[in-house]
Amino acid sequence: MAADRYLEVSLVKRGIHCTAKLLADRAPVTCDAVWNALPLAGDVYHAKYARNEIYALFPPFAETEPPLENPTVTPIPGDLCYFSFAGTELGTGAYGYDREVRPDTTVVDLALFYERNNLLLNGDVGWVPGIVWGRIVAGLEEMAEACNDLWRTGAAGETLRFRRSGPPG
């Protein structure tokens, strides 16, 4: 049996972090892809439609995109989700990424859900299932407070970082 793998998820400017356990038994291909790409960091965004979600966008980092393993359209607090989008899906002014995302590219979205009542339904394309590849096991309450602050005061200048770590405690 393989050893459990953990990572630290941080809002760098705010100095807030939490610890997540990779769900390698449920999403092995996705976990391996993310683990092998760590550390990852990028501008943080707060969701418009999915509700209680923060995320960062990255260029593709897996040799091939992971299959839809351990999917959900109703993430719960503490879920880490992986999404892959064609640039044409996000490259419009309505999403606010038109400077960062080009129509001829693919973008990976790594997201953290910090509160309940999320629904992955996009008015343009319908259901958008995500791969649940990790679960926050320590520090979710503090992270949720920081995410609410980010929602109220803005995300400009804040970075969402994922990096390897040990188990909490």
Image: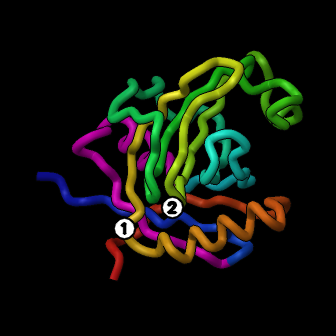
Q: CA distance from mark 1 to mark 2?
A: 15 Å
Q: In this rendering, is residue 67 above or below 161?
A: above
Picture coordinates of residue 75, whole percent (x, y): 46, 45
Question: How crowded is the residue under tag 1: few (<14 C-alpha within 10 Å), some, or many (20+)?
Answer: some
Question: Quarter-wise, where is residue 5 in the image?
Answer: bottom left
Question: How crowded is the residue under tag 2: few (<14 C-alpha within 10 Å), some, or many (20+)?
Answer: some
Residue at the limit of the structure toward the front, as seen here: 117
Pointer 1 residue: 137
Q: Nearer the viewer, residue 153 or 37?
A: 153
Is residue 105 shown to the viewer in this render?
no
**26 with respect to 21 (left or right):** left
Q: In this rendering, is residue 37 above or below 91?
A: below
Say which label, 1 or 2, has the lower sequence index: 1
**90 with respect to 114 (left or right):** right
State yes or no: discs 1 and 2 in contact (Cβ < 8 Å).
no
**155 with respect to 41 (left or right):** right
Pointer 2 residue: 163
Colour basis: rainbow
Q: Nearer the viewer, residue 104 or 82?
A: 82
Magenta-tinted stretch: 15-38
Q: Nearer the viewer, residue 3 or 98?
A: 98
Q: Nearer the viewer, residue 135 or 159?
A: 135
Picture coordinates of residue 2, whole percent (x, y): 17, 53
In the image, what residue occupies the spot 79% across and 60% down?
Answer: 155
User: Helix or strand or loop: what does disc 1 sit on?
Assistant: strand
**16 with respect to 87 (left or right):** left
In the image, what residue occupies the spot 68% across and 66% down?
Answer: 148
Picture coordinates of residue 58, whole percent (x, y): 65, 40
Question: Mark 1 or mark 2: which is in front?
Answer: 1
User: Helix or strand or loop: what does disc 2 sit on?
Assistant: strand
Q: In this rendering, is residue 167 above or below 106?
A: below
